[in-house]
Image (cartoon, rainbow, N blue to C red):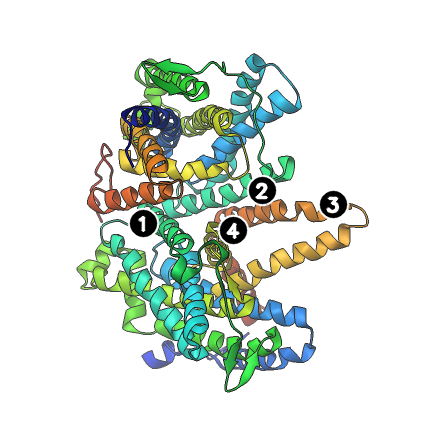
Amino acid sequence: MAIEFIDIVETSLAGLGTGSLMALTGVAFVIIYKATKVINLAIGEMLMIGAFVFYGFSASLALPIWASVPLTLAVSAVIGGVIERTMIRPLLKDNPVSVFMVTIGLTSVLIGVVELIWSAEPRRLPEFLPSQPVIIADAFIPSKTAYSFLIAAAAMAVLITVFSFWRGGIALRATATDRAAASSVGIDVPGVFSFSWMLAATVAALAGILVGSVGGISSAMGLFGLSVFVVVIVGGLDSILGALIAGLFIGWLEAMVGRFLGGEFKLLATFSILLVVLVVRPYGLFGTHEIERL
Amino acid sequence: MRVGTAKESYAADEGLFKTDTQKVWFGLLMAGLLLFPLNGSNYWMFLAVLVMINVISTTGLNILTGYTGQVSLGHAAFMAVGAYTVAFFDGRFDTPVLLNLVLAGAVAAGIGYLVGLPSLRIKGLYLAIATLAASVILGFVFLNWTPVTGGLRGLNVPTATIAGIELATPDRLYWLVMPICVVMVLAAKNLFRTRVGRAFIAIRDRDISAEIIGISLFKYKLMSFAISSFYAGVAGGLWAYLFRVVTPESFPALASIFFLAAVIVGGAGTIVGGIFGAVFMTLIPEFLKLSATALVPWFPDASIYLAPVRNIIFGLLIIGFLIFEPMGLAEMWRRTRRYFALWPFRT
């Protein structure tokens, strides 16, 4: 089988489009991990609930897009805050494995809630991105992929600016570095915890809207989260830069494998990479290598 | 108040049954298990067999997660390995049932050993993700290794036949599953009276300290993985004989969460907790099904909501127990026992 160059380019660009969404979701994961040291296995489901809330506003209530998006992000922030206050906060002092298992329980609850309200059937989000395909040189890119790439890139630029310059972002980074020290200089650490979950839920919801607009929504779309774990582990759990690079890479890899080997090999490829990274470099490409003490 | 349970020797302190009361309760439990089939209802026998299969599997996960402290998100995949092994050998070579079950356990244990290998470099949450990765890869193998696993359509499993008797119905299968379940649970209980079991507990409590006092992490972590997968494999094999068909969808990722939930709800790190958890978690969906049927006169479409409500309840049980009763049902049971043992005094 002759593989045409243009085919490779188109697949790569489409893969980078998906990869940017993985990177965005990965950033949401990293925000939570940095601030609260919680591995949030429910990140895919938080993305899903964001997409369904958007569906509720834009399709069921038929609100215009400019109203639905902010409303969705606000509702998701509230959901994130509620999750943090009711389920995560009581356990933060316990061992990390319990909190991890709470997020597993959360996965099941969120899937159940979505199926209860919207049933398990797949749905399509209303079209809101321009449908004119984008052509770069000779390569043809589906418009939704291209625009979601741009939106995801813009969102990440905003996030990085926030972390670098805004007071709240700096407080979050300080908490991530040293909780006790942050607390002693007057940072409201529990507030930062809540804020990080709310922010992450908002970012995940935005990613959910984009993922949903490309591929439709269903109660199983939390599976997207599986690829996101691979992304954050390859990139390093506490590294935003790592999530960006690994996100683009894994997205590209999945697209290439899916195009040239077949769709069923996608997860196999990413999880094989995951296993290799776990064994060779468990803290990821850019993650902090923690030294353990008694 | 019960008095006079002071132990005078280490042997007595480590005994399987520490008091006569325990022996009496155990005797009653055994009698109950022997007499249970008298109820004659096929539905109850099916449930009993399913519960005991889940007890075996949960006990296996409890050994790994509850006692050795290694969280596994791939337990259902090991069960699937056992189920496929039984389906393959019984369907292809017509080998005897007990041999098949041992093979199911052995193959699962071998794969569990391999999956455990990363646990030497990584631990805790990273390991959980690695087991998740392993289960995804195993799922891929089940789906695509068509000559052995039958691909998407899966494999049919012949009726279990022992000494010419066909164990086609749950009430007959009960007499195969029940003794295996009792033996395996007792074996697990005994395991933690030995050097190996104590090494597992030491690794869970503080792995670095355990290594310093001379416990080989390499050896014991892998051993824990293998034993745990052995239990899962046998349970999966029995499962195959109960349902008579194995497909890639028989053991979804959600099933791994089911067993993890059973361990947590029952009480991680106690054998009786694993039993409580498995019984409780298996019966909840049945209870929900019954209540949905009862609600049909008022809400005609109650059964549509069954699956989502079950998901929500599973999740809430995990979360609720972790927050309010981290030691699980076993701890509630212990408190109740203590109340009566100390009566009329209070703690």
Output the chain of dot 4: B
CA–CA distance in space, label 4 to label 1? 23 Å
Check whether the beta carbons of the residues at disc 1 and disc 3 lie within 8 A of each other.
no
Q: Which is more N-terminal, label 3 or label 1?
A: 1
Check whether the beta carbons of the residues at disc 2 and disc 4 lie within 8 A of each other.
no
Residue B127: image tag = 1
CA–CA distance in space, label 3 to label 2? 17 Å
Output the chain of dot 2: A
**Residue A184 seen in the current view:** no
Check whether the beta carbons of the residues at disc 2 and disc 1 lie within 8 A of each other.
no
Q: Give the labeled residue for mark 4.
A: B321
Q: Are marks 3 and 2 on the same chain?
A: no
Q: What kind of residue is marked 4?
A: Phe
- x and y percentages locating residue B188 in the rendered image: 40, 71
The residue located at (56%, 58%) in the rendering is B281
Q: Give the labeled residue for mark 3.
A: B301
Indicate the secondary structure of the residue bearing disc 2.
helix
Horizontal arrangement in the rendering, residue B130 relative to residue B213 (left or right): right
Q: Which is more N-terminal, label 3 or label 4?
A: 3
Q: Give the labeled residue for mark 2.
A: A112
- Identify the image quadrant of residue B269: bottom left
**Residue B248 seen in the current view:** yes
Q: Residues within 10 Å of mark 2 (few under 14, many from 20)?
A: many
- Identify the image quadrant of residue B229: bottom left
